[in-house]
Amino acid sequence: TDGRTPVDMHEVMARLVDDAGLLDFKPLYGAATLCVQGRIAGHTVGFISNNGPIDVAGANKATHFIEWMCKLGQPIIYLQNTTGYIVGKDSEQAGMIKHGAKMIQAVSNAGNFVPQITVQCGASFGAGNYGMCGRAYEPRFLFTWPNARTAVMGGEQAAGTMRMVAEGTAARKGLAVDEAALQAQSEKIIHNFESQ
């Protein structure tokens, strides 16, 4: 019931496939990004999902896996469960923008070669929604679990961003920060995001 409680997406995949099991693609590389082959009703499919944000290695791994599935002619099932691409100075210096763009390009091109199916299982925020074949990429089917959430960013992240902007503005003007007003603003933003 709490969307912030993590679910191991490998366990979800294990319950969707036939008894033959799962075959992981580069399991130790970009470990938070899961690229897995399995069979559903005897048909081989590729799964892509996440147990955390998409990092540089995960974006590279997913790009290779998508291209491989296209070469094999196997459908891709995206199980969306990500807060997005990892941000910050270190990831950006490691090439996150370049590698994330390669993944998004692979998703965009894959629709010309194989069926793509998207299931929004948990979080689907920011550019991670695009990288995991969101609505904009017109997957063959798009399903949403009742507890799934999708947005440009999560409510708590939006509230935190607005708090930083307000604190920075107050500091530049030499004013004291009104903590009660910031707390009320944060609660309003979180409620607004959650209700939408």
Image: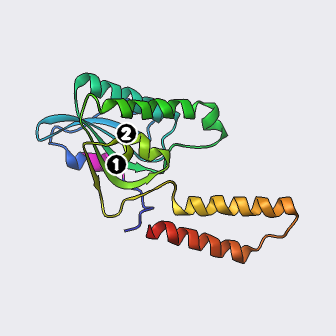
Q: Are marks 1 and 2 in contact (CB under 8 Å)?
A: yes
| Real-space CA distance between mark 1 and mark 2, rounded to the nearest whole angstrom | 8 Å
Residue that carries the numbered disc 2 in the rendered image: 34
Expressed as whole percent of the image width and height from the top left, the position of residue 190 reads 54, 68
Answer whether residue 177 is visible to the viewer in this image: yes
Residue that carries the numbered disc 1 in the rendered image: 9
Give residue 65's quadrant in the image: top left
**Residue drawn where x is 14% and y is 35% of the image:** 43
Extreme-top residue of the structure: 71
Extreme-left residue of the structure: 42
Q: Main secondary structure of the magenta part?
A: helix
Expressed as whole percent of the image width and height from the top left, the position of residue 53 reads 49, 45
Looking at the picture, which amino acid does disc 1 mark? Met
Expressed as whole percent of the image width and height from the top left, the position of residue 166 reads 73, 63
Colour basis:
rainbow
Quadrant housing the N terminus: bottom left
Q: Does the magenta-highlighted stretch encompass residue 10?
A: yes
Q: State the extent of the magenta-drawn residues as a range.
A: 8-13
Expressed as whole percent of the image width and height from the top left, the position of residue 75 reads 23, 34
| 118 or 8: nearer the viewer | 118
Above or below, comparing residue 17 to residue 64 in the picture: below
